[in-house]
Image (tube, rainbow, N blue to C red):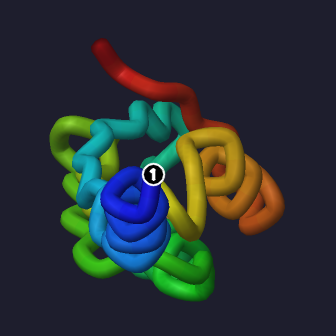
Amino acid sequence: MKKLLSALALAAVVAPVWAATQTVTLGVPSMHCAMCPVTVKNALSKVDGVSKIDVSLEKRDAVVTYDDAKTNTQKLTKATEDAGYPSSVKQ
Ligand SMILES: [Cu+2]
């Protein structure tokens, strides 16, 4: 029993490490000029947990690396939408 309890305690301590870094590609079809990616990148950079953003005007997408314990794709698409650029997850 004591062994089980210490195993549980260890799991609780280790748990935050289970948070995984995810990368998602968001399609942002309404980007149309060189300033758009800047605005989109700015909006995404304000989302807590986002560590890397690559916005391409040519491909009209944004590749975002984020910590899935802190944020999710809904928050990311909401951030771009609030900045005036609705986006959706690209498969
Ligand atoms: Cu623009």
Determine whether, in the image, residue 88 is placed left or right of residue 10: right
- Residue 80 picture location, percent across and down: 64, 57
Determine whether, in the image, residue 29 is placed left or right of residue 78: left
For this orientation, the residue located farthest to the front is: 1
- Residue 19 picture location, percent across and down: 36, 60
- Dot 1 falls on a residue whose secondary structure is loop
**Rendering quarter of residue 54:** bottom left
For this orientation, the residue located farthest to the right is: 82
Badge 1 residue CB within 8 Å of ligand 1: no
Residue at screen point 29% across, 70% down: 17
Determine whether, in the image, residue 39 is placed left or right of residue 66: right
* Residue 17 position (above or below residue 80): below
**Rendering quarter of residue 33:** bottom left
Q: Which residue type does callout 1 highlight?
A: Met
Between residue 8 and residue 78, name the one nearer to us.
8
* Residue 39 position (above or below residue 27): below
* Residue 1 position (above or below residue 70): above
Between residue 33 and residue 91, name the one nearer to us.
91
Between residue 73 and residue 30, name the one nearer to us.
73
Please tell me how crowded label 1 is: few (under 14), some (14-19), or many (20+) other residues with Cα within 10 Å: few
Residue 18 can be seen in this image = yes
Q: Which residue is mark 1?
A: 1
Between residue 88 and residue 37, name the one nearer to us.
88
* Residue 62 position (above or below residue 55): above
Residue at screen point 41% across, 32% down: 27
Determine whether, in the image, residue 3 is placed left or right of residue 41: left
Quadrant assignment for the C terminus: top left
